[in-house]
Amino acid sequence: MKYFLSIMLLLFVVTSFNVQSIFAEDWKIKGNAFVVPYLDGRDFLNETHPLTFTAMKLRLGVEKQVGNFTFNMALQTSKIFGDQANVVSTAAPVYILEGYIKYDSIFNIPLSLTAGRQQIEYNDGRFLGTSPWSYIERAHDGFRLSYKENNMFLDVFATKHTAIDASPSFNALPNAYPYPEAPYEDYDMLGFWYANKFGDKKSNSGAHNLDLFTYWEVNAQKDNSNFTKLDRFTSGFYYQWSINAFSAKAKMAYQYGTKGAKDVAASLIGVDVDYQVNEDLGIGLGTEMFSGTSPTETQKINTFDDYFGRKHGFLGVMDYFAGARNSYMGLGVNDFYIEGKYQIHPKWSISLTPHYFLSNQTSTSGKSDYGMEFDISLKYTLQKGIWIEWFNGLFMPGELMKEMYQVGTKERGDTGFSSYLRFNAAI
């Protein structure tokens, strides 16, 4: 209750001031409301009733700039309607999504340092993203050094995923320094992201966007066989070319290192080609190949791990493969799709995307056909930041999907479906 009272007090303080005077003093108020009623019939069995529930996420944040310093803080809560226990934590239903200090123009050059809890997302978020559909969104505790000039930027970051010794002593006392010292067992990430834009889509050579990145994850804990749990690099690139109404985008990441006693050698490759027929109609096609591990492989991990990336909206919107990194026997996914979007009215748009899914590796039974998914959504935009989306999806399972969803002797081969109505308001 005290957390909700804190939120109400913050709202009262914010609304008690004149908004114009707040903005005149470089204050910014940010908020987002996300309410989604779901109808979930994705079990491929018409004999069962679909699940129904409503998810909600609320966020409120403030930002204050003083000279070259920027202070940012955002609180968030998530819950399911009717569930008295919050989906985040009953003890702490409101949590700090972001809380950081940023210092700009270091040495009077376009260099900045951000320190604290912060959301990090680059490009389409596939490799490093904020996971906005998760009840607990992705945020990183750490430091980010950014250099930006014209259409180029370079970020170098160091973040901590998990701290085993989360309560160190600030006092220099003998018991604060045990001997022999405890082993270092934290989970850390170090990396960089470089991006550059050049050219003009209306010129003969078009516009070009290039991103290069590498991040290194180390979970220094030891497993039962005394191997380091994770020591893995992810390196890759994005390249996009746009000329007039045509655009093409390629992305690739390769993972290497070790996870426990096994070597890691995995990849994710995506290609997307789009054509804007006119100002109202756009069409495209593409593929995403999410590598998997053969059932006969015992020495290596070839299943790509997209832990830090966005899931919803990739590999279909029905989220059958949102957990592909650690489900479906690690076989991976190959997604082939076409897409179309039509602006019916300045406030109304409709999109349709059929997918065909295959496993990246063949199962022990020799099957690889996951099936076909059809995603269709209708979106109404009331004004900037405020919109309603109605999504419907159908999934016709292939032989491999039927095999995986079978429970005992009960076969599941009916068409799976899901529907949601998303209300979103951002200020």
Image: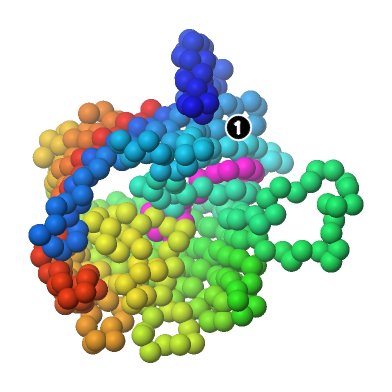
For the residue pair 21 and 264, the one nearer the viewer reads as 264
Residue ID at (88%, 47%): 173
For the residue pair 146 and 176, the one nearer the viewer reads as 176
For the residue pair 196 and 407, the one nearer the viewer reads as 407
**414 relative to 328 in the view: left or right:** left
The residue furthest bottom is: 296
Q: Start and end of the magenta stretch?
A: 111-128
Residue ID at (50%, 11%): 17
Whether residue 203 appears in this view of the structure is no
Query: Where is the C terminus found, in terms of image quarters?
Result: top left
Residue under label 1 = 70
Q: Check disc 1 and give the amino acid type.
A: Thr
Whether residue 324 appears in this view of the structure is yes
For the residue pair 301 and 111, the one nearer the viewer reads as 301
Residue ID at (86%, 63%): 179
Q: Quadrant of residue 327?
A: bottom left
102 w.r.t. 67: above or below:
below
Q: Position of residue 218 (x, y in %)?
A: 61, 66
**282 relative to 28 in the view: left or right:** left
Badge 1: how crowded within 10 Å, few (<14), some, or many (20+)? some
190 w.r.t. 234: above or below:
above
User: Considering the numbered disc 1 on the image, is that residue within a helix, a strand or a loop?
Assistant: strand
* Magenta span includes 254: no
Q: Position of residue 300 (x, y in %)?
A: 48, 84
* Magenta span includes 124: yes
